[in-house]
Amino acid sequence: MSGRNLKIAVLYDIWGDPASAEATPPKSAARRRNSSKKVEQEEKEDREEISEALAQLGHEPLYHVLDGSMQSLNSLCRCKADLIFNLTESFAGDDTKETNVAAYLDLVGIPYTGGGPHAHFLAQDKGLAKKMFAFHGIRTPYFATAYRGRIEHAHDISFPLIVKPISEDGSIGIDSNAVVHSVKELMERVEYIQDEFDSPALIEEYIEGREIYAAILGSYERAHSLPLVELDFSRMPKGLPKVATYDVKFEKGTQAHKLTKSEVAENLDDETISRLTETALAAYHAVKLRDYGRIDMRLSAQGEVYVIEANPNPWLASGHEFAMAARESGRTYTELIGEIVDMAMGRSAKIKARAKSSGV
Ligand SMILES: Nc1ncnc2c1ncn2[C@@H]1O[C@H](COP(=O)(O)OP(=O)(O)O)[C@@H](O)[C@H]1O
Ligand SMILES: [Mg+2]
């Protein structure tokens, strides 16, 4: 623990009118955040839990909202925080701009938690991330990308396939029709993704198997995996694909949500656990994550480990996968938040020391 009381700005983004966001299906993480308030009323927001943990650690937390305006960016530079706890997922409704928010914080020189711009850039384009995984010999499903008739890359892929937007998260655009079994279904789904998101479609081989998440804590050589978590699909209603759809993650009224749950992974032998954690760590480093990140994987019936995606700055809400893994490792939620703060402050101290020694 850094031993000094810090002024910490918990940074998050808001975009659009929450009332109208509820009336239309959310298309972006920013709108999901707003509209999901309706279903999460009884749950605290992650930012509230993080603020409470920071206060318990003796720090001085405050909220700073990025609402898409220049003013919200300018006032951030002037907020005199010692550290930004970065929870932003987008800027002005654009999910790809989390890269720019991190780059802006680097430019203005305020230390912040989690991934730098390079991590957000590499991870949020899932096609690009998969190319990085392939270079590092990390198994990821074969894929193709299609955008309005242009194929940017195509393996010789076989059905069943899953079609998703190339750079959304929170399972936006992933519903029970995302898994396709024929050329007709594939073409319809690609058209849906292009129309709905104005985004290239990522077409991936669908990997049947267990869904395992590795929460990774630490940076560079200190990164390590916390106990693995599994999303249990065994009670998923017949006829629905065993996929973490938007309903599974957020729509509390649906059967898909009620009958699936994440829990600490059981019944994995030591050899499989080490292959899963080693693969997750390799993926974490391949797309340059730091401080904390979550790697989503599938484990096939033949025991093959596939990386589905890498998430910089994953959701830290106390009831969700990352905090669950931290609890299983023996950490309290407050200790987890404290470790993330210490890592970011440690990095900033090193950068300052380097700058001083080189006379900058
Ligand atoms: N190739 C795949 N094979 C099997 N399931 C997949 C595959 N890709 C995605 N999924 C399912 O869809 C979910 C969401 O996909 P993911 O790429 O992680 O999107 P998001 O960034 O929205 O979380 C995964 O958690 C998994 O259940
Ligand atoms: Mg995911």
Image (cartoon, helix red, strand yellow):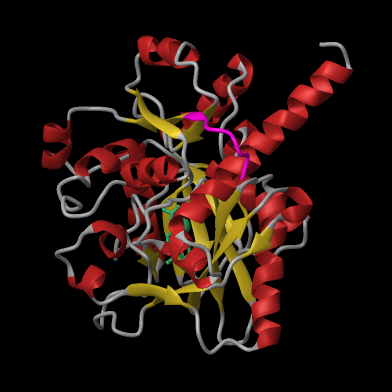
Q: Is residue 156 above or below residue 291?
A: below
- Relative side of 76 to 47, left or right: right
Q: Quadrant of residue 189?
A: bottom left
Foreground residue among 10 and 141 = 10
Q: Is residue 132 above or below residue 140?
A: above
Q: Residue at x 31, y 43 (%)?
A: 48
Q: Is residue 147 above or below residue 184?
A: above
Q: Quadrant of residue 245?
A: bottom left
At which x and y percent is residue 22? 14, 41
Q: Which segment did they paint magenta?
A: 1-7
At which x and y percent is residue 327? 48, 67
- Relative side of 77 to 356, left or right: left
Q: Does residue 162 belong to the magenta stretch?
A: no
The image quadrant where one finds the C terminus is top right
Q: Does residue 2 belong to the magenta stretch?
A: yes
- Relative side of 268 to 279, left or right: left
Q: Residue at x 75, y 23 (%)?
A: 352
At which x and y percent is residue 296? 53, 63
Q: Quadrant of residue 63?
A: top left
Foreground residue among 132 and 46 = 46
Q: Residue at x 48, y 46 (%)?
A: 166
Q: Residue at x 70, y 35 (%)?
A: 347
Q: Residue furthest right?
A: 358
Dominant SS type (magenta): loop
